[in-house]
Amino acid sequence: MPLLRSADPLTADAVRLLSAIGDTLGGHGLGFGMRVATVAANFAVQRGCPPEMVAASFYAGALHGIGAVRTPIGIELGEREAAIVAWDVPVHGARIVAAMSGLPPATADYIRWHRESFDGTGYPDRLRWNGIPHAAMAINAVRAFVEALESNGDHASPAEALFALVGDAGKTFSIQIVREFRTFFAECSETFEAPAELAWDTAGFDAFASVGGLCAEIDARDDRTHGRGARLAPLAAAMATAAGIDPEHAAFAARLTALGRLHETVPGDDYDPLSRLGRDARAADARTAERLLGVSPTFAEFAPALGAVAEWFDGSGLPQRRKGGDIPPLARLLAVALAGDAMDALAQRTVADNLPDVPVRLAAAGGKQFDPAMVAAYVAARGDR
Amino acid sequence: MIDLNERTRRISGSRLADLFFARDIGSVVDPFMGMPNHLNYLKRHGIAVHGGDLVEWFVRAGEGMIVNDFTVLRDSEVAEIVEMLPGRIYPLDLFKGWDGVFFSEEQCAYLGVWHANVHNLRSDGQTGLAIIGLWHVLCYWLQKGHAPDEMADVPPSELAWRYIRETERLVCTNNARNTVRRADFNATLGARTADCVYFSPPGKNAMKKADARVWMWEAWWQGNPYLNIEQYYRDTVFGQRTSDEGSYDRAITSVLAAAQPYPYVIVQTTAADAARFERLVAAHRTTVETVAPFPEEVYVIGKN
């Protein structure tokens, strides 16, 4: 299996994280998208595609699921409506990726059309026959193969997964792509998941902006958190300066808090952030964010802090009941900032006007739920706004 | 065995939506709509759509997925399409001319049954959806003729059932009046007003090179296996001799002239022909912009 030259590690890490977001949204295990990416790139190499197409296949495979971030949440949909909403996921993904600079130009359109079917019954455009870019159909074939492989769990058999494609020849997949995949499978079955290295210069790719942008999309799914990362980032930076933490680090971590909210319902927000009732849900959010960040070495440094934002200063929080200084300083900072933002949002959508001001309530929770020093930093930073 | 190596145009509704949203285009007319999947996508995203074509089954398909806002085919109704109904006399020999040439005897009989059943549907919307679904069956059969050992054997009624049920997802509303008409471009463009005219021009002598899956389905709908759709275009500007460059340019110019009252015109072409269409559009529009995401997918956008 010929390998190509390497992409830069920061880009690779950002793509890994973005891909994991797509995996979570799509209900797949973490690593599904990267597995699709690797096999798609190797399949493209085996078909003799030029390096740019190989790179585009890799990135499209990795990011094929992120369009789901724009599907509406909190709405009960029937089977038909859900299917129609799902039709737009590839287009959303294409638009998100098209806004990221530095990736091969064809990446977005491979994502746009990776769910089209050869027989013209796919989505979003119901393209048919050779109107579908061959590379996009190849990514779909790989996606179906890997999905079939993973659906068998520990009993995964590549040969059985191949039937997922063969049985759909002439319907979802063209005869030609199935033939090519069978050849690929026969010749490369031992190595089709070998690391794919890419001859594509990603110098223009802004890893932090791309991840931050997708986090903003996650926040925007819910009215209660719309624009939260953008609101929290300057606040967290100001608090960090007072608390002796790197302000840029804190600002970016504030945007990453969105990662915990990759699910359809957010019951934790139905409770007052100072209430113990939402603790389990907030801890689950924190664990989700920690788990996602753990897939990517560059962003993993944020994982311990994001995973501990639901801990309470007095040791009665979740998930690990850590106490005081055992909780990372950044987590203590974010816990106060998140609670303050949630209380502001709550005040805007309820008519309850008998509650004390947010700084007063936070100060009252200092020493129990929150680090008093961080509350003081929050009150000072909030006054600066 | 019939040749299926036609170069399919990539008509992407989602791409058009991107172009439209960037320009505040809220309504469109496509006078050469073909199979109007792209108009269905645009309709689903709130754009008022109008289409025209000379091939009747395309227009019928448009009745199902463009004009129709609510009507679907329920299970019992699909069942009445895909199988012979007791007491009804079917023209089982209607497509005998294709027996042994393109299809098996059983497939030809089914085509006759479906022809009768679909013509007996009372709703235009349901008729359109049934035509779309059954067309996929025809395509599957023709494709299977090319690769008999590589495609699954599916009983005709099961295949038809699956493809017709699948059309349910096409039915949607955009709270606008959407229309299709069987007419040439002059009639279509003269009958409607919209923000934009979009078209992917027929190729030179395109009618003589029509895809078998298109003309055969028109023949099926008309109940005449020997139908030649070239006759539809005989009296149009594209039906005359458009094999030479000058005649073809004049035909395109006629369309652009008819589109003159519309604020935007978008012509979809390929990189190879982009310069020609830029020149032709520039003769009718004050500003011309080209968007070229792929060599086989180039949009020449003219604006007044």
Image: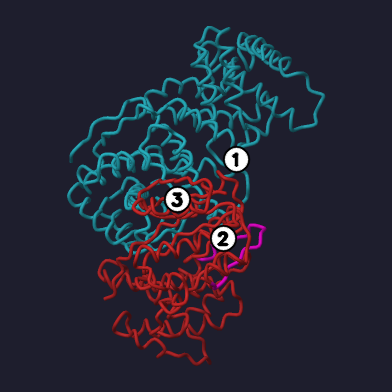
Residue occupying the point 66% across, 30% down: A277
Quarter of the image for the N terminus of chain B: give it. Answer: bottom left
Q: Give the letter of the chain under mark 2.
A: B
- In the rendered image of this protein, does residue A208 appear above or below residue B178? above
Which one is nearer the viewer's eye here, A21 or B171? B171
- Quadrant in which residue A350 is drawn: top right
Q: Which chain is cyan?
A: A
Residue extent of the magenta highlight: B167-183
Tell me the kind of residue under disc 2: Val
Same chain, labels 2 and 3: yes
Residue A170 percent location from the top left of the image: 33, 64
Foreground tag (2 vs 1): 2
Amino acid type, residue under disc 3 in the picture: Tyr
Q: Tell me the residue at 18%/41% (across/down).
A: A1
Q: Position of residue B45 (x, y in %)?
A: 58, 52
Q: Please report contact status of discs 2 and 3: CB closer than 8 Å, yes or no.
A: no
| Residue hosting label 1 | A265
Give the secondary structure at mark 1: loop
Same chain letter for marks 3 and 1: no
Which mark, by number, is residue A273? Answer: none
Check if mark 3's residue and mark 1's residue have beta carbons within 8 Å: no
Residue furthest out toward the right: A354
User: In terms of secondary structure, where does tag 3 sit?
Assistant: strand
Q: Is there any visible trace of residue B206 in the rendered image? A: yes
- Judging by the rendered image, the residue that carries numbered circle 2 is B29
Pick the front one: A350 or B124: B124
Tell which chain the image draws in red: B
The residue identified by callout 3 is B299
Relative to A318, say whether A143 is above or below.
below
Can residue A144 be seen in the rendering of this structure? no
